[in-house]
């Protein structure tokens, strides 16, 4: 079966996923592997937008940011996501994919600003759109940016890439008897106090009836199986 289950998806990558086994920063082999995964689903004809975090860069500067004003530190975090977005778009270009970076913060000399109709146009043209600088506001996260942009572009699902292959009944590292949920409703996840995305992002997806698929970015072929609608990771739905 090679027919994708979705026409348009929003992929959320954490910045830390770019580190590979390094302590911080961008690991070349890791970003290339991620781009290869992205290329596979792009070839299926799925319209793809990506939100990437900044943890891999921001963690490196965080000790020096201690005691800083929160909003200032958050703007630094957003700038870190711009760096990751540029690196990702460049790696996609090198792999023969066409990507556009759009920033929620005005830095026109570096990347074009986020303009919704333009983003929709790019997606319709089959270009991969990378949304940089999160929501553009401090006190938010890139998970919330993923929920927000996913809602704005009419994505059918938010694909949340993590290091674990889904949502478990308990922390699988601590409890060997923990089992993975194949599907779970938003209400069940709340009742069971399961952490899927941060609370703001989770609430927005729930309000918008935008399903979330939690899956492993380190498991080979997982992204493709998710896009083909196979039983991979955990589907959180209304
Ligand atoms: N950030 C922010 N507003 C946003 C998105 C991100 O202030 O809309 C800042 C915040 O400081 C956050 C950092 O950017 O800690 C990096 O984003 P995030 O933690 O979501 O990245 P990830 O953990 O996914 O790498």
Image (cartoon, rainbow, N blue to C red):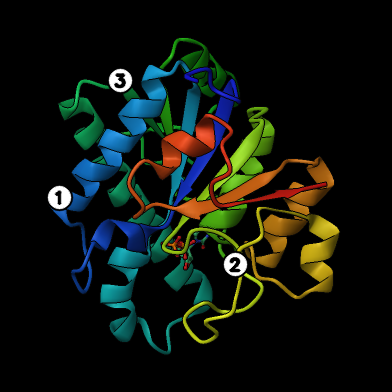
Residue 121 point in image, percent of width and height: 52, 13
User: Residue at image x 19%, y 42%?
Assistant: 32
The Cα atoms of the two marked residues, 1 and 3, are separated by: 20 Å
Q: Earlier in the sequence, mark 2 or mark 3?
A: 3
Q: Helix, strand or loop at disc 2?
A: loop
User: Mark 3 sits on what residue?
Assistant: 98
Which residue occupies the foreground of this view, 33 or 52?
Answer: 33
Q: CA distance from mark 2 to mark 3?
A: 32 Å
Q: Residue at x 28, y 65 (%)?
A: 57
**Percent position of residue 230, x then y:** 56, 37
Tell me which corner region of the image, top left, top right, bottom left or bottom right, holds residue 140. bottom right
Relative side of 38 to 118, left or right:
left
Q: Nearer the viewer, residue 152 or 238?
A: 238
Residue 213 x, y percent position in the rendering: 60, 47
Q: Is residue 115 above or below residue 189?
A: above
In the picture provided, is 33 more to the left or to the right than 74? left
Q: Determine the CA span between mark 2 and mark 1.
A: 32 Å
First in sequence: mark 2 vs mark 1: 1
Q: Earlier in the sequence, mark 1 or mark 3?
A: 1
Q: Position of residue 110 (x, y in %)?
A: 28, 37
Residue found at x 65% / y 47%:
212
Mark 2: C-beta under 8 Å from nearest atom of ligand 1:
yes
SS of the residue under disc 3: loop
Disc number lying in front (2 or 3): 3
Q: Which mark is residue 29?
A: 1
Location of mark 2 (residue) = 139
> Residue placed at 55% from the left, 44% from the top?
159
Give neighbour class at mark 1: few <14, some 14-19, many 20+ (Cα, 10 Å).
few
């Amino acid at each position: 079966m090679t027919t994708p289950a979705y026409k348009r998806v929003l992929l959320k990558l954490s910045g830390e996923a770019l580190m590979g086994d390094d302590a911080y920063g961008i690991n070349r082999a890791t970003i290339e592997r991620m781009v290869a995964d992205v290329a596979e689903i792009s070839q299926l004809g799925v319209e793809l937008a990506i939100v990437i975090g900044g943890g891999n860069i921001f963690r490196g500067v965080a000790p020096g940011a201690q005691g800083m004003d929160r909003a200032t530190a958050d703007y630094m975090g957003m700038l870190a996501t711009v760096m990751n977005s540029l690196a990702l778009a460049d790696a996609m270009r090198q792999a023969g994919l066409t990507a556009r970076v759009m920033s929620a913060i005005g830095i026109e000399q570096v990347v074009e600003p986020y303009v919704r109709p333009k983003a929709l146009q790019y997606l319709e043209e089959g270009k991969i759109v990378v949304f940089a600088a999160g929501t553009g506001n401090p006190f938010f996260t890139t998970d919330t940016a993923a929920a927000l942009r996913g809602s704005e572009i009419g994505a059918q699902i938010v694909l949340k890439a993590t290091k674990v292959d889904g949502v478990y009944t308990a922390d699988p590292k601590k409890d060997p008897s923990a089992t993975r949920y194949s599907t779970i409703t938003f209400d069940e996840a709340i009742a069971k106090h399961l952490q899927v995305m941060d609370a703001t992002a989770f609430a927005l997806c729930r309000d918008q009836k935008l399903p979330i698929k939690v899956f492993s970015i380190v498991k080979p072929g997982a992204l493709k199986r998710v896009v083909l609608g196979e039983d991979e990771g955990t589907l959180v739905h209304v």
